[in-house]
Amino acid sequence: MIEYSNLSQTKTGRAASDAAASYLAKTGTSEDLQARLRYIVIYTTAGAVSTGAFDFDVLNKRLKGFVGKSVTLPDRPVINDAQPGRMNAICISDPRATSFMVVAANKTNTTIHAFEYVKLQQAVDLAAHVGQLGSITGTVRKIEPNPNKSRALVLRIYIDDATIAFSKHS
């Protein structure tokens, strides 16, 4: 499992964003890896904006071409809604929902890199997967940087036609 939250801390957020963007630009990269790299670029660039290492102009430029492309989000624990406000987790409010939101934050949960709005292809019995990890793959419909340019909440991303792959904690 990639520790995405570790990639955007202080100086490494900028370096990680630059490295992922550079690797994504290389030809011959598989679609699966491209989808993962796109999310790494989104997350680390938002992290770099939250620390002041990048400004919103860099964010807009770097993410502009991602609409209509696939992304794969990192493994996140599937938990019951008994933990409201939980970040970096798939929280169940309706176990058969076809849409939900995930809050992607830094490791200390002091800044929100993104509100990730997910629409599934079809309902999934999330309750059957509590305690497992879920990785979401879908198509980016829209990326909205915070119009107030707040570093506390950097952007919103809308992901459609999504699926979830579940795995056990390792």
Image: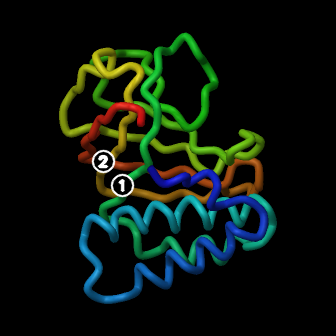
* Disc 1 packing (10 Å; few <14; some 14–19; many ≥20): many
* Residue shown at 41% from the left, 31% from the top: 100
Give the residue number, with chain letter if any, for mark 1.
72
Which corner quadrant of the image does residue 163 belong to?
A: top left
- Give how far across and how far down residue 18 sits, in percent: 59, 79
- In the image, taking residue 65 as reference, residue 87 lies left or right, namely right
- Front residue of this view, candidates 20 and 55: 20
Identified by mark 2, the residue type is Asp
Q: Is residue 140 above or below residue 75?
A: below
Q: Is residue 163 above or below residue 53?
A: above
Instruction: For mark 2, give the secondary structure.
Output: strand
Identified by mark 1, the residue type is Thr
- Front residue of this view, candidates 130 and 86: 130
Give the residue number, with chain letter if any, for mark 2.
160
What is the distance, in whole Å, between disc 2 and disc 1 at their CAs? 12 Å
- Front residue of this view, candidates 158 and 34: 34
